[in-house]
Image (tube, rainbow, N blue to C red):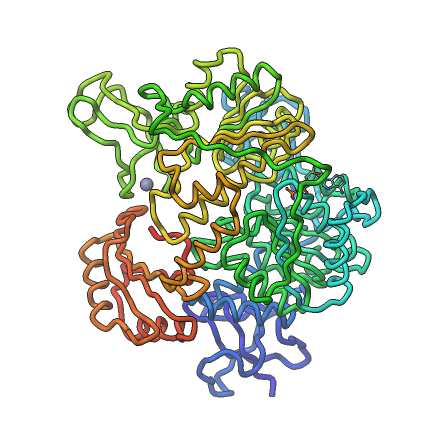
Amino acid sequence: MNRIRILVLNAALSALDYRLPEGVAAPAGSVVMAPLGPRKVMGIVWDEGRLPGEEIAVERLRPILEVLPVPPLAAPLRRLIEWTADYYCAPLASVARMALASGGALGGPSTMTEYRLSGGVPERMTAQRHAAIEALAGQQGTMRELAGIAGVSEGVLRGLVNQGVIAPVTVKIDRPYAPADPDHAPPDLSPQQATVAGVLVGAVTARAFQPFLLDGVTGSGKTETYFEAVAQALRMGQQVLVLLPEIALTENFLARFAARFGAAPVLWHSSLKSTERRRAWRAIADGSAQVIVGARSALFLPYARLGLIVVDEAHEVSFKQDDGVRYNARDVAVMRARFESVPVVLVSATPALESLFMANQGTYQRLELPSRFGGACLPRIALVDLTREKPRSQRWLAAPLIEALKLRLERGEQSLLFLNRRGYAPLTLCRNCGHRFKCPSCSAWLVEHRLSSRLACHHCGFETRVPDTCPECGESDCLVACGPGVERIADEVRELFPEARLAVATSDTLSSPARAAAFIAAAENKAIDIIIGTQLVTKGFHFPDLTLVGVVDADLGLEGGDLRAGERTYSQIAQVAGRAGRAAKPGEVLIQTRHPDAPVIAALASGDRDGFYAAETESRRDAGAPPFGRWAAIILSSEDEKEAREAAHRLGQNKPGSDDLYVLGPAPAPLSLLRGRYRFRFLVNARRSAPLQKVLRDWIAAHSLPPGVRVGIDIDPYSFV
Ligand code: ADP
Ligand code: ZN
């Protein structure tokens, strides 16, 4: 029988049956094109009996059209796709699509046309053409990419192609990557490091599932140590996946990787050009890409010979995806390692409580690096009590921190001020009438960005110019900025130390790999005295002359009061503190707070990590929160507030409940309006034994909701807005 069931890449359809034409082979995992009405759809041939769906009568089966020329997705990846869809209550097709994340790689020719300047000049020069030519110097890419770079329409560029100013170039897309050499420049490991590396190398050699928690203080050489496991995988001809939480960190990582292995790793992230993406995808699928460094989406790629997974900075909340398929890459990484039968290493100086719990239970093997490499000491940490040391009005730095900055400037050392708030001020209001600037599509204040003279919504990206007059009362010169963002702290520092060289480091200023690289180079070359940054600068960076870290407002993260507020504050501040004194010179950390006795702050000051985790664990146990119980959030949203509210109430009338699962809500979500949609929320708390996903699926499936209402299910949520 040549009936096959296909996972169609369309969330609304998912499983459909087809016929395999005579003489065509398409084992499970094959990527195929199939007819659907008058259209063509892409799908993946699935294992018999694993996808639910009705059987169509034999005579009605249509033949598939084509098997695409890529290796079939292997069974471990198919199991991972099933597990992810099931656990996170997501459509199988949406998860599967992440594995096929390069349309170009799946068929097309192996060469493509890119464009670049030919050196010629147009017959008629316009301002727009001139600007485009300037912008494209040294660039090569597809029409669309070049149009993006030049900020003009593709039409303008086509005009230049017709005149020979821009010339087509044929590019081979799938050229191989330079090989990494496991023995290029191995370091001399300290005895501590060597012990840990030995265990990891052993696990790679054993080729079996084994989860590790590599728990080492900042600056202990965790990267150098797990690089030994990477080297072992390379020697064995296996692929390695290294997940990093932010693209901004990759520059730093790439340089270290290249120094150790003599070649760059293969990158995977959302801003790759389509050609780079295609090349990477094909090399991953045919096994020639050796080490892949990527954002969380790299987790679902079809590795041909995976031998090791590393999740660096594994505590980072950005591993949790909050739209589309809402998965936690840290957890899915462990599952993938399990299906692939390979070791996985979670690396962190401040592990997530869930990870520590698994280690304490013995589920994960814990590997420790308790001291800094090369005899560097951990920094000295002191609190600045803002209720006693009051900064001047409309200023945020207290005297002890100002003194410490001054001392560093005198000594020619670097300082880092940390405030997790982009922009100039989080709220702008009118002094005359009290009008507050709000986003038109979200229930959120607009954040002033003075560097770009804009008011911006950090939720939806809405931006507007800062007006000269109040839109409410019409007064001029009446707008007041409330509270500080990093730009405002930079102003304060500039006023205190006019000679100091400052750098504001946020996702606004380090928005591209090139800008991040320029920042790192400037810091390393001591062209910067004081860095003022958001969470972006809390990890990964190693600046030997940085000896002071000032935390401007340690209480900020505790205000929201969600489940992980304490843990997040602890890890953020411990991580940023870890930037100080990483080399020969000792480091100092000053933490400004109005609550020096709050458990998190006190634990940071005394360096009592174990005490903090123990207390946090107990409060999680009391709350039935992870890892002891589970939470889920269900958000109903609609552009029509009444429709959303009514749908939520209807769902609420039949909410499930039992001894081991209860549902709170519905209530307006804390962010009750987001991107123009009104949001109502249920929170579900369940014991680990409760069949949470099944209960939620059955509950929601029993209701038909109006087409304007969207339902989002978030299992193990990180965001409680
Ligand atoms: P972590 O990731 O634990 O914060 P890193 O791996 O960044 O630590 O190491 C801190 C610094 O010490 C880096 O500059 C690194 O190159 C250096 N280092 C660590 N171990 C060694 C070693 N065995 N030999 C030489 N340099 C090392
Ligand atoms: Zn908005």
Q: Is residue 473 above or below residue 283?
A: above
In the rendered view, does 180 fall on the left or right side of 625? Answer: right
Residue 710: image x %, image y %? 31, 60
Residue 377 locus on image (x, y percent): 65, 36
**Does any portion of residue 107 appear in the rendered image?**
no
Q: Quadrant of residue 579?
A: top right
Position above or below: 313 against 483: below
Q: Residue at x 60, y 44 (%)?
A: 273
- For the question of whether residue 363 can be seen, the reply is yes
Q: Nearer the viewer, residue 643 or 670?
A: 670
Q: Residue furthest right?
A: 183
Left-right relation of 267 to 689: right
- State the image coordinates of residue 335 (x, y, percent, origin top left): 58, 66
Which residue is depicted at the point 58% across and 14% down? 410
Residue 668 as seen in the image, left or right of residue 405: left
Residue at x 36% of width, y 37% of height: 595
**Which residue is at the front of the view, 711 or 559?**
559
Q: Position of residue 26 (x, y in %)?
A: 64, 75
Viewer-proximal residue among 93 and 265: 265
Q: Nearer the viewer, residue 704 or 556?
A: 556
Quadrant of the image for the N terminus? bottom right
Figure disc tally? 0
Residue occupying the point 49% across, 49% down: 318
Quadrant field for ligand 2: top left
